[in-house]
Each structure stands twice: as structure tokens, then as C-alpha cells.
Image (tube, rainbow, N blue to C red):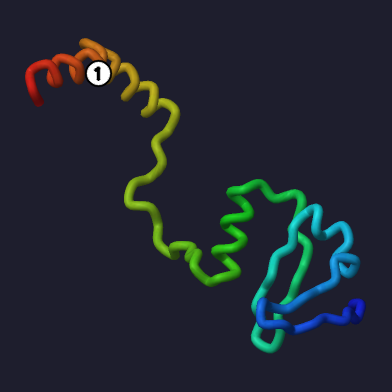
Amino acid sequence: MGTVIVTQMVPQGLLVPRSALGEWLERGVDVVKEKERIVIRPRPVTLDEREEAIRILEEAGLLVKPDWEPAAPPVSDAELEELARKFSVGRPLSQLVMEERAEGW
């Protein structure tokens, strides 16, 4: 079970003594609203920003994993090489863009 902490409710919010949170303050804390209570917990130290964003969205119910298949199958390495060979013929795309801009596109 956790430690009992004496808190104080004031107009500005709920005051929690710094000593009660200890090293959590250095790592940062997450405040999680549950059905019957609010939980203050230390932030995980191993998550990068992307994983942290995914975790927050999942907890909020805002991240949905699709239950359908992608519209097109993945492209194989051989197909990628074939496409690279086909698209590498002719002038560079950057040159075409610069010419079109000069023409007023």
C-alpha cells in the first residue's frame, strides 16, 4: 500500500508537500484522473517522446488501432529497385520544378 500524505485544499488547488514527492519532482509527475480518485505518479524514464505521446493518447482513449488491412500491399525490395530505376531516367525533379516556377506556375 502507499504512503499517507497530509494535503491541503486551497482556492489555488490541492497542495502536496514537496517532501512527499521526493525524487519524483526531478523526473516529473503525471496526474491521472480515475473514476474514484486522482493518481499522482512518477513519469516513466524509459519512454521517448513518441512513445510518451502514444501512451497519453491510449490512456485518453483517443488512439484507435484500425481493424482493416492496408489498401495496398507493402512494396518488395525488388519492386522498389525497379521503381527507382524507372524514375531515375530524365532530368532531376528539382530542375523541372525550378523551370516551372520560372515560367510562372
Q: Residue furthest bottom?
A: 36
Q: Amino acid at mark 1?
A: Leu
Relative to 5, does residue 24 appear above or below in the rendering? above
> Which secondary structure, mark 1?
helix
Give 33 or 10, whichever is nearer the viewer: 10
| Tag 1 residue | 93
Residue 34 position in % (x across, y down): 66, 81
Relative to 56, does residue 2 appear above or below in the rendering? below
Q: Would you say residue 92 is visible in this rendering?
A: yes
Residue at the image position 89 percent from the left and 69 percent from the top: 20
Would you identify the image quadrant in which residue 60 lies? bottom right
Relative to 90, does residue 26 appear above or below in the rendering? below
Residue at the image position 44 percent from the left and 65 percent from the top: 67
Would you identify the image quadrant in which residue 44 lies? bottom right
Residue 48 position in % (x across, y down): 66, 46
59 sits to left or right of 102: right
Relative to 81, does residue 3 appear above or below in the rendering? below
Would you identify the image quadrant in which residue 2 lies? bottom right
Mark 1 Cα shell of 10 Å, populated few (<14), some (14-19), many (≥20): few
Residue 32 position in % (x across, y down): 67, 73
Which of the image's four quarters has the N terminus? bottom right
Residue at the image position 66 percent from the left and 82 percent from the top: 11
44 sits to left or right of 34: right
Residue at the image position 10 percent from the left and 26 percent from the top: 105
